[in-house]
Image (tube, coloured by chain):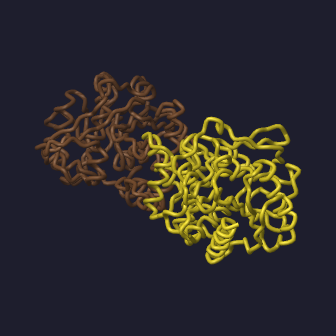
Chain colours: A yellow, B brown
Amino acid sequence: MTAATKSCLAITGGVGGAKLALGLSRQLQPEKLTIVANTGDDFEHLGLDICPDLDTVMYTLANLSDKDSGWGQADETWQFLAALGQLGGDTWFSLGDKDLATHVVRTRERAKGKSLSVVTRELCSALNIEHSLVPMSDDPVATLIHCQSGEVLAFQHYFVRDQCQPAINGYSFSGIGSASRCSEFTRALQDPELGSIILCPSNPFVSVAPVLDIDDTVDMMVQQSAPVIAVSPIVAGVALKGPAAKMMAELKMPSTALGVAEYYVDRYPGLLDAIVLDIADAKQATAVEALGVQALVVKTVMTSLQDREQLAADVLKFAERLSLV
Amino acid sequence: MTAATKSCLAITGGVGGAKLALGLSRQLQPEKLTIVANTGDDFEHLGLDICPDLDTVMYTLANLSDKDSGWGQADETWQFLAALGQLGGDTWFSLGDKDLATHVVRTRERAKGKSLSVVTRELCSALNIEHSLVPMSDDPVATLIHCQSGEVLAFQHYFVRDQCQPAINGYSFSGIGSASRCSEFTRALQDPELGSIILCPSNPFVSVAPVLDIDDTVDMMVQQSAPVIAVSPIVAGVALKGPAAKMMAELKMPSTALGVAEYYVDRYPGLLDAIVLDIADAKQATAVEALGVQALVVKTVMTSLQDREQLAADVLKFAERLSLV
């Protein structure tokens, strides 16, 4: 059996993870890939249900995403936001005119009683996305950022409104104790044909951890024979996108790929089989392997579509190799 | 006492009425004018509270309205609507990107428990509108169109979705029996300084009638000493905007300014003191006066801003003259 016939479960946050998810979707048949997105960032804003990570992945898979920022839609316009400002509304969260349609449809459909996963499936279907993109949960989970000042911020207030300026000393996921996985997520975890579980290059603390922390997800991943492979979102000591490196420094961790591996090993003992490091971090491979984690060193910086496809192919091949050990 | 020191109550629907409302706002100090807009057209669409007539008047007063169509905003864009279509949403009601901000803010503020009149005041204040624009009621009233086919349509379905194509044989206002006037509307009706009540050139059946039919509005207008003056929305046998003339034909009324006068006299005995006819309809003045209704013949077609101001001045001067009789 080759990797191509085995299925893959990818856990992702927004921009960086979405790039790899797109690469995976171009390497695997729709029935072989389940992409689970973090919903801890979700929030209600202006009466609308907004799911930033889900939407970033959805727009990326639909080839609608803005190529420069990685989030939102290409050729977006901002007339709504300008008019909202004129009416005295909150404009700190950038809602584009096209993007708004997603939130309006989602809010309305959920108000009718549909679950987030059903609405996500409908939206993906309308955008001709064939691969399975599912929220981690249909239950509300809210990532909270604990600042060194003592303040606790809702994630989007920290991330967007305050531009990640506050120094943090922790984070938590409100509602996580009573949240259940989406059924598609559980089904993917139970798939006897599962060949890889990939933790995409997303923020380990606020994008991947909420997904892992639901229910017995980590136990199920540990019990699964498929290798669990993280792709480091830290390259050469910096996060390509977002506050991961800054958070690591504030949390007294080394802001390195090795630091990412150490974090996963500490927080989720026995979970991680391997980590993918960028060639810039090749020298950290030995230290990573000393943690009992296999290391693959390849180019992980994804600039072009070909980069996304190549990294996906590399990771899947790596998973296949790990399965044969 | 001159007309300028007396106050004016204007009853209006959308486009045509809004033009005269704007003219009145340029002739009268803010404290001397109350504009009451029809809300029978209001509906919930995509989970948003939409008030077409209120918004048309609001945008007109704020100098934001699209000069060609008379509704919506100038320099509007339609990215949201295109994206909504891509998601399979209902696109028959044209929601512009700028316009959306109004509906999103209104929906959110009303969800917090604010009344429509409070939210309208806040929106108008944000748009620097100094004159008082109030909804006829804070209670829901829904104009229903009774088609000759037997079908009953919500107003916007008839007006926008079906482009006024169905032949009608009646209309009704669901909820009118339990709706109360807004307090500002009642206050204007009770104002001892009231010098004129103007029924703007809006559809007599579905724009003006819902406002008149609330509570004891007609009785209060009849008892008020201020003259009630309608401005005919029919000029030379056609409605300048909307289905008024088509409806009159289907309701077996002559589609003329005289027909409008006859309708008001029949439906609301004793209400109408006068009607303003366009110069194109000068020959109908005698027949109108035979109904016991005074006639003023002036140019009523409002193309320019100056036309709006001139008609407003003409009507106010006419009201003053009628008061002296």
The answer to which quarter of the image holds residue A193 is bottom right
Q: Is residue A12 left or right of residue A149?
A: left
Which residue is farthest left? B252
Q: Is residue B182 above or below residue B60?
A: above
Is any part of residue A55 visible from this angle?
yes
Q: Is residue B291 left or right of residue A94?
A: left
Residue at 48% over, 62% down:
B79
Q: Position of residue B220 (x, y in %)?
A: 32, 23
The answer to which quarter of the image holds residue A323 is bottom right
Is any part of residue B284 visible from this angle?
no
Q: Nearer the viewer, residue A78 or B226?
A: A78
Residue at 42% over, 44% down:
B50
Q: Position of residue A278 (x, y in %)?
A: 77, 71
Q: Nearer the viewer, residue B241 or A79?
A: A79
The answer to which quarter of the image holds residue B49 is top left
Q: Position of residue A24 (x, y in %)?
A: 59, 68
Which image quadrant: the C terminus of chain B?
Answer: top left
Q: Is residue A165 left or right of residue A224?
A: right
Q: Is residue A64 above or below residue A310?
A: above
